[in-house]
């Protein structure tokens, strides 16, 4: 069982992953997909990173802490990029989820993992 403090980050990562996937789908449906293409690419990467981070947190991996730092950066970057297209509902919902995920992952990234 992972420490209770991991639960919030795991939940946030899972929500962010789902919202990233929805952003990709909504972005590909846009009339001018070229205007959101770079956001779609970032969202795909962010979804993958959030998935890996939640998996490492769930198993209590020693790599979870550094992955949380990467996840927080990816989520911050995506939130900024997607925020420029906030009229698209899936994008604005992704921004919310990514900000929450970045916040939770940042907390863990700053924490010191106890030595085994």
Image (cartoon, helix red, strand yellow):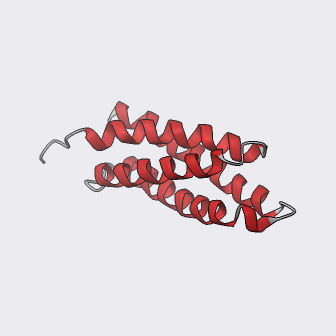
Q: Is residue 48 left or right of residue 111?
A: right
| Residue 1 appears in view | no
Residue 9 screen position, x and y as percent: 44, 39
| Count of all numbered marks drawn on residues in the image | 0
The residue sitting at 64% across, 50% down in the picture is 82
Name of the residue lying farthest toward the top: 4
The residue sitting at 61% across, 37% down in the picture is 96
Residue 111 screen position, x and y as percent: 24, 38
| Residue 89 appears in view | yes
Foreground pick, 100 / 87: 87
Q: Is residue 112 left or right of residue 100?
A: left
Residue 35 screen position, x and y as percent: 74, 63
The residue sitting at 30% across, 44% down in the picture is 109
Foreground pick, 44 / 91: 91
Vertical relation: 89 (above or below) 61: above
Quadrant where the N terminus sits is top left
Foreground pick, 107 / 114: 107
Task: Tell me which corner region of the image, top left, top right, bottom left or bottom right, holds residue 42.
Answer: bottom right
Residue 53 screen position, x and y as percent: 42, 53
Name of the residue lying farthest toward the left: 115
The residue sitting at 29% across, 56% down in the picture is 63
């Amino acid at each position: 069982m992972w420490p209770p403090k991991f639960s919030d980050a795991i939940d946030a990562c899972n929500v962010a992953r789902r919202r990233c996937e929805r952003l990709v789908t909504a972005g590909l449906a846009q009339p001018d997909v070229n205007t959101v293409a770079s956001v779609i690419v970032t969202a795909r990467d962010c979804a993958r990173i959030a998935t890996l981070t939640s998996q490492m947190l769930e198993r209590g991996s020693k790599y979870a802490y550094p992955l949380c730092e990467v996840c927080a950066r990816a989520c911050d970057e995506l939130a900024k990029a997607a925020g420029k297209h906030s009229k698209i509902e899936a994008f604005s919902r992704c921004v919310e989820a990514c900000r929450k995920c970045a916040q939770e992952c940042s907390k863990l990234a700053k924490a010191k993992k106890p030595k085994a």
